[in-house]
Amino acid sequence: MRLRITFAKTNAMRYTGHLDLHKTWERTLRRAGLPLAYSQGFSPHPRINLASALPLGFTGEAEVIDVWLEEELPVEIVMEALRKAAPPGIQVQYIQVVDPHAPSLQTDLQASEYTITLLEPLADLDARLQVVLQSPSLPRQRRDRSYDLRPLILDLQRLPDDPQGCPLLLVHRAAQASATGRPEEVAAELGAAPEAIRAHRTRLIFRT
């Protein structure tokens, strides 16, 4: 049985990295008493698949994980067990049954959306946005890999300021195995330092 769980990663787990989040989910599923399915081979491990790593310091309201169980269980039972077992920082939103042979989450992921809060004002923000949007290319270097950020930005627009008066941006970016156009890199093109933003993933967009 393959279940697709949509959950929120909130402020309580903002500084929990991808690997630790995976381990947290393993502990949560065991605490919930669910019959986890394991991989084959010399070192079996629970069949758990997170759709997309969320960078350290980011939060998300529509994160997705696939989990395989050895037994068929009603979704309502699984939901109740997980909500009781989930630690602070993880909020289970909903669960659906998925075809066991459906594509992997990473293969099926097409794009994602973020809201970026600018904690420090940027002069001429609207003009900066237009410069980025009108640029034919935005060369970037990440680790040992060079890529063009511009085609990865599917949409970039300003939203109404938050209640504290901080500017908000919407970033809709393509997901590619070679380069994903991380939100902080988009913010950097606008002149914002990484420590001067807060990023929140609002949606993961799949092909199917």
Image (cartoon, grey):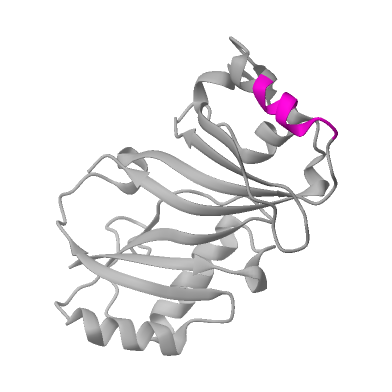
Q: Nearer the viewer, residue 177 or 153?
A: 153
Image height check: is 100 above or below 122? Answer: below
Position of residue 53 measured from the top left corner of the image (x, y, whole percent): 52, 49
Residue nearer the viewer, 18 or 36 = 18
Quadrant for the N terminus in the image: bottom left
Residue placed most toward the observer, 65 or 203: 203
Which part of the image, by quadrant, shows the C terminus? top left
Which of 182/65 is in front?
Answer: 182
Residue drawn at x 76%, y 33% as measured from the top left: 125
Q: Is residue 22 above or below residue 120?
A: below
At 29% from the left edge and 59% from the top edge, which residue is drawn? 39
Residue 10: quarter of image: bottom right
Range covered by the magenta-colored residues: 123-130
Place of residue 72 in the rendered image (x, y in percent of width and height, measured from the top left): 14, 77
Instruction: Pinpoint residue 170: horizontal percent, then vertical percent.
Output: 57, 43
Q: Residue at x 77, y 53 (%)?
A: 166
Q: Quadrant of residue 99?
A: bottom left
